[in-house]
Image: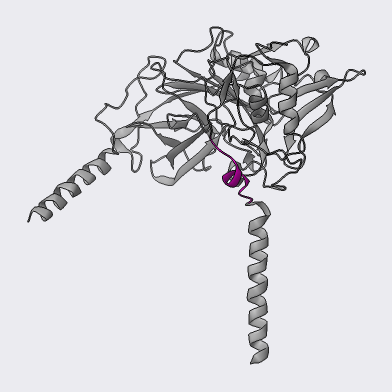
Amino acid sequence: MLGRLVTRVLALVVGAMLMTGCDSNEPVPTTLLNGSNAPALSVDLEGIESRAVLTSVATSAFDEIEGSSIAAGCLERADGDRASGPVVIRVGVDGESVTFRTGSTRGLYGCDNSEGRREADRRLCGVAFGQLSESGLRDSRLNIGACTTKDGAALGFAWVEPDPRARYVAVERNGYVEVYETAGQLPVRVTTSNVDVEQSSATLRGSEHASDGSLIRRFRLEASVAG
Amino acid sequence: MAGSRTLLVSFVAAFVLACTGTATAYHTRFASNNCNYAAPTPTSYITRDGSATVALRARHEGYQWAGGCWNDNDLDDSPNDPTSDPATGGEGGDCSGFTFKVWRESLNEADAGFYQWGMLRAVHGPYTAARFRAGHGAPNVTLSKSALTKMDALASDSHIGMIYATNADGTDQIIEAKGEAYGTNIWTRTYRGDSSYSGVRRTGWSS
């Protein structure tokens, strides 16, 4: 009798943990790094529902980038090699990024920013360069180290190459799911808290969704700092 | 009947041999069999000659994407790993992992102190070549290429190598983890004249 009761209680606890993603009752964030409200998600993403936080994304032409912006600082990294296509600027809950590709070098440039402390003269907490080939990026160009939350927790940034059908890329965070709209036919630079500083690596879990929110695939990305 | 059995046995044996050959081609288990996670030893100083000695111990060893563990037998113990795969567990550092270890840096980018990592310590560190090139991390600064000296580095967005010596013609002998097909060694390079490369220095050398 007692054994049956214990079994039922355990089943309830396990069920509740699975439903909540085993996380605390922390509220889902409603604001982004720049203080703006997270945009409303117009569709339900299959399997995510109420835990989703949509990040903001803007695309600009090379000539439209303002001189003092994070994007302008990032464009300087290309050593005068013009962006071929849009410059994609993303703002998430605790990270922001810039991504663009250049024509002559077949390179993909990225710049990352977060709230945490860093060397005084640094606007960015990380930079990334990926070599593009016919088959895509050589790797996800993980950036860790100087990127942290306001409280000092480690953050990592990496590119995800979504399925061409994907409109949304969703990445598991602590208690919520950060959602990125695809843009400019470029890899999507995403943020993760699941960073292993000792191993210079990060594990990202997420999913890709079509315009109507339907699930295209789930993914688990093991990323390492390299090269 | 006997012929069919012989044919079947031969086919199975050939299949097993082929699979074994493929599998052992790159699953060397070098890292899992040899590397460790021992804590680094903090040291109070770093010298350019001392760092060159550390770097030379990696000479003729292998190259591993995202790696940072090698022995000192002047042999690539895991040749022909698939490139760009951190999971192959082969011997060697990649260019940035090699530099991190030779420059005795910390996993904490805000810490400019000196940390002696054992050769067989599996560690890559937080920097990519692009981040070294940008001077990220408390120990690292960018500087003019004309000011570079022994064990300073030349870095592009996709590669970094340290100056072992400078040649009379202005080229440099660069000690670097070059790639899976080449391993780690010293090569004469023209990075100093290449606009895609910038000068990077680890700060705090005693001599």
Position of residue B6 measured from the top left corner of the image (x, y, whole percent):
67, 84
Which residue lies at the image location 66% right of the left edge and 51% below the top edge?
Answer: B26
**Relative to the observer, which residue lies in front, A54 or B129?**
B129
Picture quarter with the N terminus of chain B? bottom right
Which residue lies at the image location 64% right of the left edge and 30% below the top edge?
Answer: B97
**Relative to the observer, which residue lies in front, A151 or B69?**
B69
In this picture, which residue range is highlighted in magenta? B28-37
Position of residue A158 measured from the top left corner of the image (x, y, whole percent):
53, 31
Position of residue A161 measured from the top left corner of the image (x, y, whole percent):
54, 38
Q: Is residue B24 visible?
A: yes
Q: Residue furthest left?
A: A1
Position of residue A102 measured from the top left corner of the image (x, y, whole percent):
67, 26
- A9 sits left or right of A36 in the view: left
- A16 sits left or right of B48 in the view: left
Q: Is residue B160 visible?
A: no
Q: Is residue A117 above or below residue A225?
A: above
- A77 sits left or right of A168 in the view: right
Q: Is residue A202 above or below residue A99?
A: below
The quadrant where residue B207 appears:
top right
